[in-house]
Amino acid sequence: MNFDEHPADSAESAEHGHDDFIFICPSYLECVLAAGDAGDIATLRDWLAALPRKSYGRVFIELDSPMQIQLLDAPPGVGITWIERNPSEASGTGLMRAVEGWLDEWLRGDPLSGRYVHLWTGARDNFAVAEHWNRLETELSEIWAAAAEYRDHLA
């Protein structure tokens, strides 16, 4: 089961004159993505606090119980998804599935866009998750190198 904290609704912010209105243009957007478990909450809190207010992206946090959910202050364009661990799956499975789905939508769907994703990964005490992050970092490096080469070729 996933529990989302949704970013501020942009239309509502604009109507009420909030300074946190974010215009999202995927072609020029630099996204943030963070993934970890309940043991990473304090570090994620610091990471979120250091993000620029105009950041856009998602934070996924896997936990054992909804009782572990905490209030986290994130920029208005950064949503937080709490993922309750499925007892019939290995720890980290739901977390990795959520990250893969997000990357499929935001990066892999248009890999030559060169969209850069500032990635923070936790839950590294879980061997399977740490290996997954290592493979993901290699894949992202290859995508960004190919996108840069493609842009250079077009120039």
Image: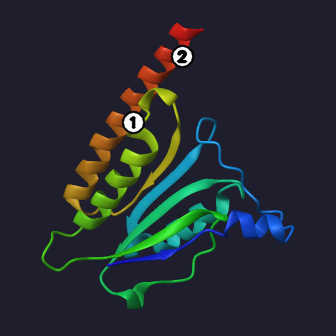
Q: Nearer the viewer, residue 151 or 137?
A: 151
Q: Nearer the viewer, mark 1 or mark 2?
A: 2
Q: Which quadrant of the rendered structure holds the N terminus? A: bottom left
Residue that extends furthest to the left in the rendered view of this protein? 88
Q: Is residue 86 above or below residue 30?
A: below
Residue 24 disc label: none
Expressed as whole percent of the image width and height from the top left, the position of residue 8 reads 66, 70
Left or right: 7, with 95 as reference point: right
Left or right: 63, with 91 as reference point: right
Question: Within the image, what quadrant is residue 27 found in?
Answer: top right
Residue beneath the point at 26% across and 76% down: 85
At label 2, which amino acid type do we have?
Arg
For the residue labelled by badge 1, is the local secondary structure a helix, a strand or a loop? helix
Left or right: 9, with 61 as reference point: right
For the residue labelled by badge 2, is the local secondary structure a helix, a strand or a loop? helix
Expressed as whole percent of the image width and height from the top left, the position of residue 66 reads 38, 87
Q: Which quadrant of the rendered structure holds the C terminus? A: top right
The residue at which mark 1 appears reads as 140
Expressed as whole percent of the image width and height from the top left, the position of residue 106 reads 46, 45
Residue beneath the point at 56% across and 72% down: 6
Q: Nearer the viewer, residue 38 or 93?
A: 93
Q: How many marks?
A: 2
Tell me the CA gap for discs 1 and 2. Answer: 16 Å
Residue 124 can be seen, yes or no: no
Left or right: 110, with 135 as reference point: right
Residue 102 can be seen, yes or no: yes
Residue 151 disc label: 2
